[in-house]
Image: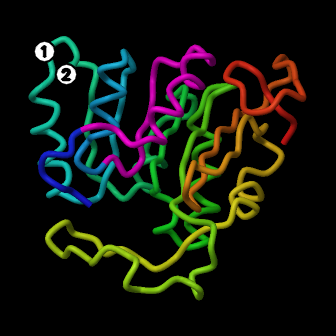
Amino acid sequence: MYRPGVDGPGDFTRWAVPYLRSAGVRRVVDLGCGPARDLRFLVGEGFEVTGIDGSPAALALARRALDRLPAERRRTATLVQADVVDGLAARPAGSAEAVHAAATYQGLTRCELRRLFREVHRVLVPGGVHVWSVRSDRHAGTIDPASVPPNVPGLGFVVPLRFLSREECARLSGPKFERWALVRAPGSRAYYAAYRKRVPSIARSTTRNEPGRLEPG
């Protein structure tokens, strides 16, 4: 949801950057990039970022945000208008070192999520990083509709009343990914996740939530 004057990244993306750096990531796909607050921050941090979003209005705001960057930084950002699942499916295998999704997945059906996680695995290089956040792990039936932001038809999509549990996201990752971090966001029911695509050469560690070290999934 776009609010004029709020241009900084979310807490989740700030949390994710050390994990991306620790894994040596350069190329990131940002799913559901919206008006590019997080994308613009990632570009400013030196990453090459492709943002995918289905809303023409959101991408117009994203282009405006990227225009405020220096020219050399703008060249490292690409915007693609597409459904996030279809947009990811259109990318070549092994074309990304990380997939970033800030509060994007609760808008998808279970069938779409299963397909999306398969595509994330296909698109990532071996050892690639999948980082995402979910606004709440509470069951949708217990959420007061008044607590959900209103739908904004002008953006080209609606906000569904659906949330994901951490257990569901862990199941979606399956055995092809190794859990790096799965933490509750301070002071909320949101949570942050970082997983890596399994490769035999990556050493495992029992240390939790520390960038650069893996915990067993």
* Residue plotted at (48% across, 42% down): 12
Answer with left or right where residue 130 lies relative to residue 78. right
Compared to 59, does 137 lie above or below? below
Q: Quadrant of residue 72?
A: top left
Q: Which mark is residue 194?
A: none
* Residue plotted at (79% across, 51% down): 174
Compared to 49, does 103 lie above or below? below
* Residue underneath mark 2: 74
Residue 51: give x, y in percent of width and height. Answer: 33, 40
Badge 2 amino acid: Arg
Residue 195 colored magenta?
A: no
* Residue plotted at (9% across, 39% down): 64
Residue 96: give x, y in percent of width and height. Answer: 51, 29
Q: Nearer the viewer, residue 38 or 25?
A: 38
Magenta residues, start to end: 8-33
* Residue plotted at (41% across, 55% down): 84
Q: Nearer the viewer, residue 191 or 76?
A: 191
Badge 1 amino acid: Ala
Answer with left or right where residue 131 lies relative to residue 101. right
Q: Which mark is residue 71?
A: 1
Numbered disc 2: secondary structure? helix
Other-residue count near label 1 (Cα within 10 Å), few / some / many at <14 / 14–19 / ≥20: few
Q: Are marks 2 and 1 in contact (CB under 8 Å)?
A: yes
